[in-house]
Amino acid sequence: QVLAFDVKRIAEQNHPTVTIKNGTYIGTHNSHYSVNSFLGIPFSQPPIGDLRLAHPVSLNTSFSGTRNATELQPACIQFAAATIDRPISEDCLTLNIYQPSGFEHEDLPVLVWIYGGGYIQGSNSDPRYNLTFIVNNSIKAKKPIIAIAINYRLNGFGFLGGPALRDQGLANLGLRDQRLALHWIQENIKSFGGDASKVTIWGQSAGAGSVGAQLLAYGGRNDSLFRGAITDSGGPLGVQGPSNATQLSTWNHILNSTGCAESSDPVVCLRGVSLDKLISAVNSSSLSFGPVYDGDFLPTYNSAQVSSGDFLKVPLITGSNTDEGTEFVGSASYIGALPAVSYPDEASFLQVVNSSLVNPALTQNALAVISALYPDIPAIGAPHTHIGRLNSTFGSQYARVASFSGDAKIIAGRRFTAQQWAKHGVPVYSYRFNQWPIGGLPDTTGTTHFTEIPLVMDDEPGNGYKAPWYPAGSEYSGMDANFTALAHLMSKYFFIPGSRANKPSVESTKIETDLPRSHVDLIRP
């Protein structure tokens, strides 16, 4: 009898099960990290057929027996799908749950990850977003958490604009997918040992913009879906989709490309178009997709909402990287390539200034002020890792351009958000990530967009990364032990199970306001 009990216990460990509202799922157990994974669990009816270009619909059926949740499921339809090593599908609204083993009956805090990718690509099946390591780190810290990665529709399937869609209330479908996933978590997380009242949402880049959108949703309405938020390189001021003119142009292009331009109901027509034809139409468009102001989910301008305090007042951790702008000025920095555009003179700098703004209608006086604020002094520009003026391939004004671009797209929004949170009496904690990438990226890249993710994910094995991010086959331990220390530190700081972020053990300064708040610089010890 004892032997039979031990065999049963071992079997349950290797194949953990969980019963939720609509049935029972079998997961997998990782004994090395002490984490149970339940992968690819649907949180919505498949958004196909009549549910294409429609609000996500909750599951309304149950099943008997058990279903496997042991394999990652397809990514949502996206641009550059041929470059990712995983399948894509319209039926993609799933989530991955990482549960600390042995804590199945606790009321644990919950961390929800929303990936970035410019609202046109990304997925919870991306190996770089494996949340196993964060959960394992939480166990070691004796503050175990559950972590969840969600999928949401992208590009023309999740963020298509157009008059017919707006008239039918069908804008911002990708954001609505995220919202439904949060409702699913509220209904089911207790079965995994989670506390529905202790959910924190976290995202990077477009994922951070998505978190910002959830903070602004319905005028900051509190639906009790989460109690805290974390935004890396984005946030409420990053909720910025294409202009109305671009939306209309993209809409018309897709209608013309699919034969739906003359339809009396173009939305119904698009639902009947073959998947291949719709993908081709989307991929041949401007690929400019993102959240739009629809008078409903996003009622008005994000800056106006943040200024007036019409946001969900929950504690916020927000931050950015020192050299964000090198990613946005034509440099394929992640593969060490040279920039596609050179910035040789003042005119090229001012052109970037205008193009970085939503409504570029700056007066000559305003341009002169901005030019003076970003002087032609490479030492104070971006990237901070390169000493001296860059060569003609980059252009003499590259440092100014990269510095302004990072401020305009990411850093200014982070600063303004922190100020307004503090102004309205809401706890806010800000960071600046200043560590040059751990791999072999050139010094012209600097601490650019996304470079914090391997560390904050505590991804010591380097899952999903290739050189020059990581020299082939290497780990943190093969380079510098301080990287490991910084990764452990960051993954703890970025999610703290208590109701407030923990007190930093590194030097802090004040947010730019009269109210005291914490700001930390993150660099390896």
Image (cartoon, grey):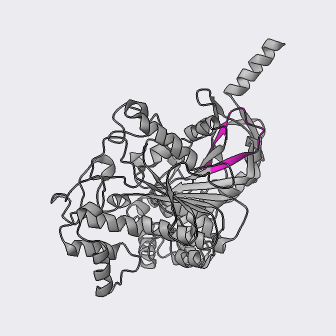
Q: Residue at x 35, y 67 (%)?
A: 405
Location of residue 309 by image quarter:
bottom right
Q: Is 413 a magenta residue? A: no
Foreground: 401 or 188?
401
Location of residue 107 by image quarter:
top right
Q: In x, y percent, where is residue 63?
A: 76, 42
For the stretch drawn in magenta, the main secondary structure is strand
Q: Is 100 a magenta residue? A: yes
Foreground: 346 or 179?
346
Residue stretch in magenta: 94-111
Q: In x, y percent, where is residue 501?
A: 62, 54
Image quarter of the C terminus: top left
Q: Residue at x 54, y 55 (%)?
A: 203
Q: In x, y percent, where is residue 100?
A: 67, 36
Q: In x, y percent, where is residue 428?
A: 59, 63
**Is residue 55 depicted above or below 477 in this figure?**
below
Horizontal side of 436 relative to 339 (left or right) equals right
Horizontal side of 397 relative to 505 (left or right) equals left
Whether residue 229 is visible: yes
**How many discs mark residues in the rendered view?**
0
Horizontal side of 427 relative to 269 (left or right) equals right
Whether residue 91 is visible: no
Image quarter of the N terminus: top right
